Image (spheres, rainbow, N blue to C red):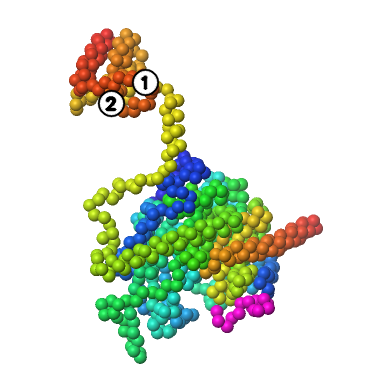
Amino acid sequence: MAGLELLSDQGYRLDGRKANELRKVQARMGVFAQADGSAYIEQGNTKALAVVYGPHEMRGSRSRTLYDRAAINCQYSMATFSTAERKRRPHGDKKSTEMSLHLKQTFEAAILTQLYPRSQIDIFVKILQSDGGNYSVCVNAATLAVIDAGIPMRDYVCACTVGFVDETPLADLCYTEENGGVSSLAMALLPRGGQIALLQMDARLHQDHLESMMEAAMTACKGVSKVLDEVVRQHLEEASALSRD
Amino acid sequence: MKDTPLSNCERDFLLKAIEEKKRLDGRQTYDYRNIKITFGTDYGCCFVDLGKTRVMAQVSCELVAPKESRPNEGVLFFNIELSPMASPAFEQGRQSELSVKLNRQLERCFRNSKCIDTESLCVVSGEKVWQIRVDVHTLNHDGNLMDAATVAAITALCHFRRPDVSIQGEEITVYTPEEREPIPLSIYHMPISVSFSFFQQGTYLLVDPCEREERVMDGLLMIAMNKHREICSIQSSGGIMLLKEQVLRCSKIASVKVSEITTLIGKALENDKKARKAGEKCGFAESMSQERITTLIVDETPVEMTDVVEQADDIIKNSKAPPETPSSPVVPAPGVGQVGQGLQNSWGLEEQDSEEEEDMVVEVQPKKKIAKGDIVEISDSEEDEVVILQPEAPVKKSTAHQKGATTSKKKK
């Protein structure tokens, strides 16, 4: 976009970050008492809430029961006040359905569904404030919520959106950067094995740059996983401290 | 209507074949099916056959008011219809998961990659712009609808001509095709998608899965590229875990395939242009060949048979001769059949009669077999005398047999 420099000559972005810096992540687990697992995460200005119910008996259509594993039901929605212009249709539109499908696919790969045959796990995610990287923040929030619910997973699922400007990959895009016509790559990664649960890319990117983009995304995801790990351990300490008293 | 479920043995068969690098239609791992592109009579209508998968794309345009956020850009609208004609699993009341997925993928592939110059679609800034609508209809689903849909959509967009417009002060005149030649759209590049299917937790990979292969696959990776080796979109779906090397390898394969398909599209557009200029009749009806039964003709599938012949020979050599009872009935005279003729009595009644019948049966057997001239190799029979019997000969035997039968009846 003319006039909006996404990466200055000194290597600083619009919000003062360097190219490979992530936004500040603050997260809290166990925010709701009613749900089996819940989490709230803030990544920069993007805020998301995730809630997990399950594993419980299959609700809705019994015919969709899987005989050997749990079915995962994901719902993604954005609050009407989450974007600059009021969102008229928070859920049911194509973008939300697509996001829900992607979330479902990501967690089907990560959760050990074989341990809970004929049951259902619900994951609900809501974006309270959208400032770029919606999908990644949702995945991170949902990971924390699933851990809070005590459902076993193969590994943390960490996601990050990476953009490409001036031959440099930018980690963790914000809204202005995403809509600036920059090619963005969203990746959900299981850090320990380096396995990619979901890969999504829009806008033109030359094939030769693909490798560096993916490398940058993997590094960023590993950074996110460290933060999430910290959050989980701290939550565990707090919980055990309370129970000891 | 629910689709017929896939049986376990068919699933195992498909997976085992994939492990041995064999596909149902004899293709190699990285081979595409035959792509055939035909055009309709109007500009902007295109049919694409990817093997047996068939889709149709139609482009239409309309003058509308532009979006407030983009007052000097035209509007692009993409829509894929999964009609029940294509597969019994598709229902008329839309919004199935597959429909949403395909729609979103098509949108992201074309809109975000800016393949069409939308600013050239503006007529009066802030008031009137062209809205280009691409409708893709699936006519037959035999796997890989996404690739067929992208090829159809981009070909239709390249083929489309919009009416010419002229502005005189405040007045806008839209000319009909008869008044002024319609103008083609300005297309920057042609994004084409290539689908990779993964099996056995990502161990095996196939390009362009057919419907059966799609049913047993773990997941799908769709890479959309143009011939300048720019990636327009990547989407992984299904619960598979990918490795970075796999994705990079797939992108290399995709670039090769995309350049092939782009040349094919270019040729098809050229041929159509020539045909229209020469005044030949063109259109969907013309592209169908006349006076041929098209439904039952199947192309020769190049399946590798070399090891199968050896295996078959082994099986034949090691097998034992079948029991002396043939399963085919003997026809004593043309047009007449007899029940029970020539079969060994397995009920164990009346030992004598059965012996009699046995003798006769034994006599009849070898010659009967050769008379039929069928599956002679099954048993390593020592009969090298091939006697072709005349229709009268069996009649004699039948009378003899009948005698035996009647005697047995009497004895009863």
The residue under label 2 is B372
Q: Position of residue B102 (x, y in %)?
A: 45, 61
Q: State the residue at coordinates (34%, 73%).
A: B161
**Residue placed farthest to the bottom in the image?**
B169
Q: Which mark is residue B280?
A: none
- In the displayed structure, B80 sits above or below B76; it is above
Q: Which mark is residue B381?
A: 1
Tell me where the magenta segment starts and ends, as one range.
Answer: A1-16
For the residues bearing labels 1 and 2, Cβ distance under 8 angstroms? no
Provide residue B307's location: percent of width, then percent of height: 45, 37
> Count of labels shown?
2
1 or 2: tag closer to the N-terminus: 2
Left/right placement of residue B197 relative to residue B156 reads: right
Q: Residues within 10 Å of mark 2 (few under 14, many from 20)?
A: few
Q: Regarding mark 1 in the picture, which secondary structure is present there?
A: loop
What element does badge 2 sit on? helix
- Residue under the point 36% across and 78% down: B63
Q: Is residue A32 visible?
A: no
Amino acid found under the numbered disc labelled 1 = Ser
Image quadrant holding the C terminus of chain B, namely: top left
